[in-house]
Amino acid sequence: MKTYLTYDDVNIVPKFSEVLSREDVDLSTRFTKNTTMSTPIVSSPMDTVTEYKMASEMLDRGGVGVIHRFQSIEKQSLDMKRIWNQWDSWYNIGNPKKDRTDHGRIFDEWYKSVRHWNSPPTKSDYEDLHELLWFADEAQKDEDYWSKRPLCAAIGTTGDYLERAQELVKNGCNVLLIDVAHGHHKLVGDALEKIKKNISGVEVVAGNIATREGAEFLLQSGADGIRVGIGNGSLCETRIRTGVGLPQVSTLLDVVTICDDFDVPCIADGGIRNIGDVCKGLGCGADSVMLGSLFSGTKESPGQIEKIGEWPNEKLFKKYRGSASRDSKGNDKNVEGNHKVVPYKGKVVRLLSDIEDGIRSSFSYVGANDLSEYHSKVKFVRVTQAGTIEAKPHLIGE
């Protein structure tokens, strides 16, 4: 019987590096065969993680926000239309961009907008300026780069999924994500075939799978991206209730080889509890990582902020739930998830910056300038339980 490893079982070995600055490393990657991202981060299509606000922020930062399917076709399509309008107007595809890349003009307009009587700009104001200047630099990239940016939404494999897919594509979607728990299934293969036959100009990410055979099935069925991971989500109870699932590190190492054979990117989905796990997922060969729990509780995640306790001891929370939870389904049928409230985390952009900083540092530790080089240079060692404990912050002598 083969032993499978997960993120806590391994660490990345540091290597000789000539990376002079972490800011010089290139985080760009592919989401599908023909779409690209400037950062390898994807927000999960969960109804307490990604709707318009999260997808908008992810687009602005160069990642992908997958708009969840647990809503009406009209509401999901409206969110997609808003994302398309934002993308089209901000990057102004096909039109001169000089007005969008003049840093002096941007600073002057920013200063006029934040000027307060008898008070200087706030920290938040300066963060907004930083983002505006970043966008200006990104806008200078060629139009071909922007034409390949993924605008993604999730669909299922039964009921109105084809109608939903068609409406999403009409409203600007260029990547559909088939969002089911078990992707190595006839229904998924049939859905891929119908979408490819009936809808032109759209790519399809399929999953979830946890075996090389599952990946090969989806790739032969025409998938343009593969989502990897079963039973390892932060609120997932699949392994507890069914006994099914595989630890993520060994799963990714098995699956990426067949994805490479087909030249199709794969997404590491689930099991990620910290930024180090993000780096390990990429080190296994994944082209991007999908995050749910790390983005839960942010300002951009759907749901109301809840106050618990009384001032001055009150604390802020937001709800986070698994897609197969009783709270989400509204009944006890096929429950394989849980729900909870999580502390309010503020703006997601701060989390994204922290994650990107961690990835850049990991690249530097192994001497990689981009993701392809990172894939080739990462070497894992297995660690003991004591090594796992040592890896966490600790104080000597307590």
Image: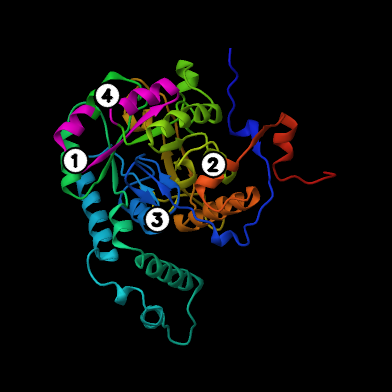
Quadrant of the rendered structure where residue 190 is?
Answer: top left
Image mark for residue 375: 2
Given the image, on which type of amino acid does mark 1 rest?
Ile
Label 3, on which residue?
A: 62
Cα–Cα span, label 2 and label 4: 29 Å
In the image shown, does 333 or 102 lie closer to the viewer? 102
Residue beneath disc 1: 73
Labels 1 & 2 near each other (Cβ < 8 A): no
User: Which residue matches tag 4?
Assistant: 189
Residue kind at label 2, given as amino acid type: His
Q: Nearer the viewer, mark 2 or mark 4?
A: 2
SS at mark 3 in the image: loop
Q: Which callout, 1 or 4, points at the residue further toward the start of the chain?
A: 1
Report crowding for label 3: few under 14, some 14 to 19, many 20 or more residues within 10 A (C-alpha).
many
Marker disc for residue 193: none
On the image, the x and y values in percent for residue 179 come to 32, 32
Of all residues, the one furthest to the right in this rendering is: 397
- Would residue 288 be found to the left or right of residue 384 on screen? left
Per the model, the C-alpha gap separating discs 1 and 3 is: 26 Å
In the depicted structure, whether residue 323 falls above or below residue 318: above
**Residue 249 x, y percent position in the rendering:** 55, 31
Residue at mark 4 to residue at mark 3: CA–CA distance: 30 Å
